[in-house]
Image (cartoon, grey):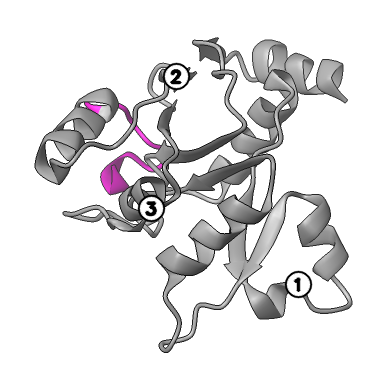
């Protein structure tokens, strides 16, 4: 499967992979910009190429029969996202329960253009005491760029400037949503 993924990603699509994925068992992976459903398939190809399990969270109902097995097999973890539930706390518990958990999230929280990122990924990483790895999907340059792991500090403002700098100039699949 890895050979097929490499053939599709590098040869057919003509993309490049910049930077190795760090040797960490637990982290929050922020992927941006997220402007299209195509990003999911780019992510699957990269996940296969780097030979790492990358996880996601989804509402509990997704993990019910008949398709729940598929979402778990794909690396998903069910989470209670109701109003009465704290997603950051619940996600942190998943990090505590697993030996390996690399949670991929879109900091925009949507595929549309946003003026401000969501902060959940930051607080999950802080509470779980895991690093953040930044991954850009740059359709303009046809490259996926992976950062070194960065632990959040006590200065959210400074940290977010660093994250935004990493993604500066990156063009999404739908440029007007970038």
Is there any visible trace of residue 169 in the rendered image? no
- Labels 1, 3: front one: 3
Mark toward the start of the polypeptide (3 vs 2): 3
Viewer-side residue, 135 vs 24: 24
Q: Which mark is residue 145?
A: 2
10 Å crowding of disc 1: few (<14), some (14-19), many (20+):
some
User: What residue appears at the point 84 percent right and 70 percent down from the top-left corner?
Assistant: 67
Magenta span of residues: 168-178
Tally of marks: 3
Q: To which quarter of the image does residue 42 belong?
A: top right
User: What residue appears at the point 63 percent right and 20 percent down from the top-left corner?
Assistant: 13
In the rendered image, which residue does mark 1 sit on? 63
Q: CA distance from mark 2 to mark 1?
A: 31 Å
Q: Position of residue 27 (x, y in %)?
A: 51, 37
Vertical side of 148 occupied by 111: above or below: below
Viewer-side residue, 170 vs 102: 102
Vertical side of 101 occupied by 68: above or below: below
Q: Residue furthest bottom?
A: 84
Quadrant into which the C terminus falls: top left
Mark toward the start of the polypeptide (2 vs 1): 1
Q: CA distance from mark 3 to mark 2?
A: 26 Å
């Amino acid at each position: 499967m890895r050979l097929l993924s490499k053939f599709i990603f590098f040869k057919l699509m003509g993309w490049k992979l910049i930077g190795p994925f760090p040797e960490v068992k637990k982290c929050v992976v922020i992927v941006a910009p997220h402007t299209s459903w195509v990003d999911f398939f780019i992510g699957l190809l990269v996940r296969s190429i780097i030979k790492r399990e990358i996880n996601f969270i989804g509402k509990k109902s997704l993990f019910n029969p008949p398709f729940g097995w598929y979402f778990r097999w794909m690396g998903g973890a069910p989470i209670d996202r109701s109003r009465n539930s704290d997603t950051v706390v619940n996600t942190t518990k998943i990090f505590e329960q697993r030996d390996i958990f690399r949670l991929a999230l879109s900091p925009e929280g949507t595929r549309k253009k946003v003026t401000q990122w969501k902060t959940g990924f930051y607080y999950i990483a802080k509470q779980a005491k895991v690093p953040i790895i930044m991954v850009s999907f740059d359709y303009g340059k046809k490259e996926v760029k992976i950062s070194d792991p960065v632990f959040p500090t006590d200065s959210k403002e400074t940290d977010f400037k660093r994250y935004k700098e990493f993604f500066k100039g990156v063009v999404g699949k739908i440029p007007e949503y970038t």
